[in-house]
Amino acid sequence: SVGATATMVAAGRARATREGLLDDPFAEPLVSAVGVDFFTRWAGGDLAAADVDVPGIPWGLGPMTDLMVARTRFIDAFLTDAVTAGAGQVVLLASGLDARGYRMTWPADTTVFEIDQPAVLEFKAATLARLGARATVQLRQVGIDLRRDWPAALRAAGFDPHRPTAWVAEGLLAFLPPDAQDRLLDDVTALSAPGSRLLT
């Protein structure tokens, strides 16, 4: 019940961590727990890019892993800057197997909300609990499909629309049709106090 895209992204983070380019100790165990052999082998370093990527094609697991390095570092820096500047809330839209609530250092008064399908969040929480991982922040999971009334579910989880918020829609908008993109951005805007920031 964990999507292939979420697993592939985590596999890229895991491979980059194995190569010393990132520090995400939870990516590889999460990928392994999903149990897709191909992604497990990529995350674990058992496959080389030359084994799986088509020569002359600009997209493949090698370039995807490079992208995960750049993207992860950029988003981590964005979040660090945002909370340092006073954003007391972080909302990760379609958070997938992201483990920023476990691997990053946060100010004590920060709350991180993860929004994704209930099964994805339950799987991630259960896997990390088995690893003995503990959140480094007040972490609240909001299990809801983004096609439903996620703003109401977010508020019900304790989100305060009067506090500045750092929003992250990582790799999400490309999967939404234009009207759904507009709706998502309208909802984010309506929930954003002055000083809020959005990264897509």
Image (tube, helix red, strand yellow):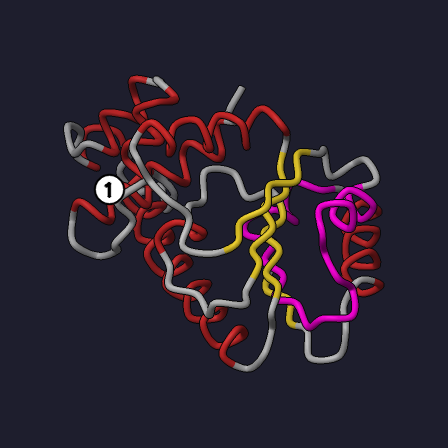
Q: Where is residue 101 in the image (x, y as percent from the top left)?
A: 45, 51
Res 152 quadrant in image:
top right
Nearest to the observer: residue 50 or residue 109: 109
Please check the rendered image and state whether residue 157 is part of the magenta-colored stretch, yes or no: yes
| Percent position of residue 155, x then y | 78, 51
Q: Residue furthest front?
A: 108
Q: What percent of the width, then of the height, locates residue 111? A: 57, 59
Residue 29 vertical position relative to residue 159 in the rendered view, above or below: above
Say which residue appears at 33% left-offset and 40% top-offset.
Answer: 133
> In this image, 143 relative to 85: left or right?
right
- Tag 1 secondary structure: helix
Q: Residues within 10 Å of mark 1 (few under 14, many from 20)?
A: many
Q: In this view, does 122 lie to the left or right of 20?
A: right
Would you place residue 197 above or below residue 39 in this image? below
Which of 172/197 is in front?
A: 197
Q: What residue appears at the point 63 percent right and 28 percent down from the top-left corner? A: 118
Instruction: Depth check: give the residue in front, 168 or 71.
Output: 168
Q: Position of residue 143 (x, y in %)?
A: 66, 34
Q: Mark 1 points at which residue?
A: 15
Figure quadrant of the N terminus: top right
Q: In which quarter of the image is residue 30?
A: top left
- Amino acid type at circle 1 is Arg
Magenta-tinted stretch: 150-176
The residue positioned 19% from the left and 32% from the top of the image is: 44
